[in-house]
Image: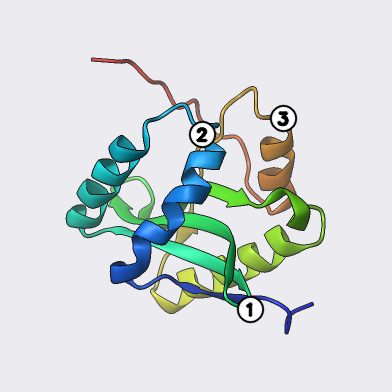
Amino acid sequence: MKNRFDINIIPENRLESILPLVDLLNNGAIPYELLRERLQHMIAMGSYKCIGIYEADELIGICGVWILNKFYVGKHIEPDNVFIKKKYRNQGVGHLLMEWLFEYAKEIDCLASKVNCYVENKKGNVFWESHGYQTVAFHKSKKI
């Protein structure tokens, strides 16, 4: 399977190619132009990247990546907005992605990986736990 998929950081000038998958991830709930605008702001922050999973030339999966540094954990990597096209799910693609992510994190001297996952996302929580993540805190949110 490893030869079937190509996993790499998507170059900044091609990051808009992720928007159709981000749109699917959000079930079309966020207007496409707003997704585009938010992506531009994320890129401008300087700590956002996105991993692309390709089969031939087709982008079949994405994993946003934040490289952060916080007092309590130090430099760490935070996967975000992970999405694999439906027909590629349950084929080990997520496992390959996580292997790649952890290797990349080591290469850039990250000490840990943190992830936010919605409480009601049962499959997502099982996925993250199967890759060694533990629930150690509650992430709170408030609209302003």
Secondary element under disc 2, as helix, strand or loop, is loop
Looking at the image, is 30 positioned above or below residue 33? above
Does residue 84 appear to the left or right of 50 in the view shown?
right
The quadrant in which residue 109 appears is bottom left
Count the marks.
3
The mark that comes first in sequence, 2 or 1, is 2
Number of other residues with Cα within 10 Å of mark 2, as a class: few under 14, some 14 to 19, many 20 or more: few
Picture coordinates of residue 52 (x, y %)? 51, 66
Quadrant in the picture for the N terminus: bottom right
Name the residue tied to disc 2: 26
Picture coordinates of residue 79 (x, y %)? 49, 52
Residue 138 visible in the shown view: yes
Q: Nearer the viewer, mark 3 or mark 1?
A: 1
Looking at the image, do the residues carrying marks 3 and 2 touch, with CB atoms under 8 Å apart? Answer: no
Residue at horizontal 48%, vertical 65%? 51
Three-letter amino acid code of the residue under disc 3:
Lys
Name the residue tied to disc 3: 122
Query: What separation in Å lies between label 3 and label 2 (alpha carbons)?
Result: 16 Å
Question: Which of these two is toward me, 23 or 135?
Answer: 23
Three-letter amino acid code of the residue under disc 2:
Asn
Name the residue tied to disc 1: 56
Three-letter amino acid code of the residue under disc 1:
Ala
Number of other residues with Cα within 10 Å of mark 3, as a class: few under 14, some 14 to 19, many 20 or more: few
